[in-house]
Image: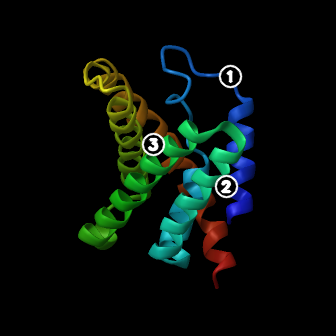
């Protein structure tokens, strides 16, 4: 699973940054599909481990700040997905969970950046943009997960 996450992160880094978004924040989050798979089919502890290992990979590839942003965003994302899937059981869609995870990821990164820079004006400036971006990218990632979920289901039989 970690190898798949790493490949998706590398592919995503090859894509140009999306306009109107800060380069560190404006990514699709394709690797979150694998993290969500781990949450649902492998285990919650393992999903948390994947988020931590992904952040270590980011430290090695892009440095400490990228790793820290990945860690805080990734953990908040996983915790939100776990909490919402537990709270709503079978009544919540993968798209809704993906949106919540994407928004959680953005919030985790933004709060970390604000703490490091000791500037909460960043939150005020970027939060609305990142909220919309998280909703859009979370929707796309959730749709992608819905498309490939039958493959995951066949693998797990």
Tell me the CA gap for discs 3 and 1.
18 Å
Q: Residue furthest top?
A: 20
Nearest to N terminus: mark 2 or mark 3: 2
Image quadrant containing the C terminus: bottom right
Nearest to N terminus: mark 2 or mark 1: 2
Mark 3 vs mark 1, foreground winner is 1
Residue denoted by label 3: 138
Q: Residue 87 vs residue 54: left or right? A: left
Q: Residue at x 50, y 44 (%)?
A: 68
Q: Residue 85 vs residue 57: left or right? A: left
Nearest to N terminus: mark 3 or mark 1: 1
Q: Residue furthest bottom?
A: 157
- Image coordinates of residue 103 in percent, x first then y, are 37, 41
Query: Residue 129 occupies which quadrant of the picture?
Result: top left
Q: With respect to residue 48, does 64 lie above or below?
A: above
Mark 2 and mark 3 in contact? Answer it, CB < 8 Å.
no
Element type at mark 1: loop
- Image coordinates of residue 81 in percent, x first then y, are 38, 60
Q: Residue at x 62, y 54 (%)?
A: 56
In this view of the protein, can residue 79 be seen by the observer? Answer: yes
Q: Residue at x 33, y 57 (%)?
A: 80
Residue denoted by label 1: 16
Q: Residue at x 48, y 37 (%)?
A: 137
- Image coordinates of residue 30 in percent, x first then y, are 60, 46
In this view of the protein, can residue 147 be seen by the observer? Answer: no
Mark 3 and mark 1 in contact? Answer it, CB < 8 Å.
no
- Image coordinates of residue 156 in percent, x first then y, are 63, 81
Residue denoted by label 2: 5
Disc 3 residue crowd, few under 14, some 14–19, many 20+, Cα 10 Å? many
Tell me the CA gap for discs 2 and 1.
19 Å
Tell me the CA gap for discs 2 and 3.
16 Å
Front residue of 63/111: it is 63
């Amino acid at each position: 699973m970690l190898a798949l996450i790493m490949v998706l992160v590398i592919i995503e880094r090859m894509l140009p940054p999306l306009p109107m978004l800060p380069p560190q924040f404006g990514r699709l989050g394709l690797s979150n599909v694998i993290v969500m798979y781990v949450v649902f089919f492998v285990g919650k502890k393992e999903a948390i481990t994947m988020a931590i290992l992904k952040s270590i990979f980011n430290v090695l590839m892009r440095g400490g700040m990228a790793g820290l942003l990945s860690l805080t965003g990734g953990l908040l994302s996983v915790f939100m997905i776990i909490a919402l899937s537990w709270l709503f059981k079978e009544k919540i869609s993968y798209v809704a969970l993906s949106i919540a995870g994407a928004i959680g990821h953005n919030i985790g990164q933004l709060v970390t950046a604000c703490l490091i820079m000791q500037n909460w004006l960043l939150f005020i400036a970027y939060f609305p943009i990142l909220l919309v971006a998280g909703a859009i990218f979370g929707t796309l990632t959730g749709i992608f997960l819905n498309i490939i979920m039958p493959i995951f289901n066949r693998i797990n039989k």
